[in-house]
Amino acid sequence: MARTGSINVTGPGLPLFLTAGFRLYFLAAGCFSVLSIAAWLAWLGLHDAGGALSDPPMAMAPHLWHAHEMIFGYTVAVMAGFFLTAVPNWTGSPTARSAFVALTGLVWLAGRLAIWFSAHVDPLAVAVIDLAFIPLLGLKIGGNLLKKTQLRNVIFLGLLTAMFTGNLLMHLEWLGWTGDTAVAGTRLGLYTSAAMIVIIGGRVVPGFTRNALNRKGHAGPLPRVRPALDKVAILASVLAAVASALPVPGIVLGSLCLVAGVSNGLRVAGWCGRLTWREPILWVLHLAFAFLAIAYLALAAAFLSPFPDETAALHLLAIGAVGGMTLAMMTRASLGHTGRPLVVARPVAVAYLCIFAAALVRAFGTGFLEYFQTMYLSGALWILGFGLFVWIYLPILAFRDSAAD
């Protein structure tokens, strides 16, 4: 998202965080990411100590709760904040009203509570509550996109449909209506999130870098965008998302991941990332996209060879690529859309590094640490990274607009 002026639409007594989609959902995503990983670590710690909950609040296995909430809780919240801000810019349509932001925010929160207390709520009610959010979001942004048709952006409606389908697959198993679809649902959600980064990141990373270099009067090479390579990367990532939820041979999914990894690696290699090392708000985008390419290659290796383990590759994708890019976009967009200079505070740069370190520790830490030590260290790094985000951005998103600074 390009930098714009403040989009405050405050009214008498209206909380600032309800005046724009990015304010509510970026703040909610940051807080939820800290709380959900803290809860996950608490469960792991209890298990590590030889204990167990006699009456757990959630009906599903804790590892499935963890996967579901990081994909369909945290990541979907970031998507909501992004689309509710970007689509009006793309189409020239009005931004979402505060009533819509508040209503959908309550629906999102109800979904998180329904999942957490699912052991005590009818599973059909849990499914209906949790599944309601993405259709509401899709109807809102779809109406804007279709009023002013931009074919290249209509793909996001398809990707949101894939996210909904992934969530649905998980609930169908929890309802007892299917035998084994929850894992397929997590994969579809994660791979679809990666495909969104392939598309959106492929637009904004070279664009933001080119703009920054031009502002500095850079006389050397600028980021290269190669449309044919972009199409290959997007097609491979979308097909990989579809294949991830289907009973296809490993060689098929591995081959798609290989193409996605190579093509996206070539893309980011041509975007002049080496020139951004002095500006964290730029190098984080390049590093997150590089993690995306590396994660695809690791997944290809997991399917086509004995090493690495698929779980390690999936966490490179989930933490390094999705976690890194969503944090990068939230920190940048929050500054740009409140009229602030696009310069992050030093603790935010530390937060970026924490997330990438968390990805590496989670993926490869068991090579030199015990399993639980790996989980604790990776989780602590994640909590520190997003805790710093909430600490720095809470005043920006909830308490002050740029005019008050």
Image (spheres, grey):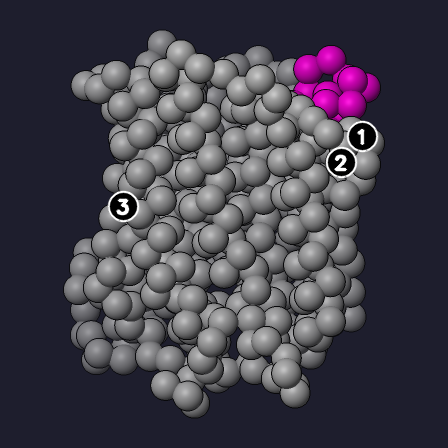
Which percent across, then down, holds residue 79? 57, 54
Q: Secondary structure at mark 3?
A: helix
**Which residue is rendered at x = 56% and y = 60% of the image?**
25
The image quadrant that residue 334 belongs to is bottom left
Q: Which residue is mark 3?
A: 354
Q: How many residues crowd around disc 3 within 10 Å: few (fewer than 14), some, or many (20 or more)?
A: many
Q: Are marks 2 and 3 in contact (CB under 8 Å)?
A: no
Residue extending farthest to the bottom is 403
The residue that disc 1 covers is: 122
How far from the left and from the top, in percent, is residue 140?
75, 63
Which amino acid, by three-letter code, is at mark 1? Asp
Please name whichever residue, 30 or 189, is drawn nearer the observer in this view of the structure: 30
Residue 45 image-quadrant placement: top left
Q: Which quarter shows the C terminus?
A: bottom left
Q: Position of residue 27 (x, y in %)?
A: 50, 61
Chain part drawn in magenta: 171-182
Q: Earlier in the sequence, mark 2 or mark 3?
A: 2
Q: Which residue is mark 2?
A: 126
Q: Earlier in the sequence, mark 3 or mark 1?
A: 1
Task: Give the alpha-carbon distance from disc 2 to disc 3, as whole Å.
Answer: 34 Å
Looking at the picture, which amino acid does disc 3 mark? Cys
Asked if the residue under mark 2 is in contact with the one under mark 1, i.e. CB atoms within 8 Å, the reply is yes
Residue 262 shown in magenta = no
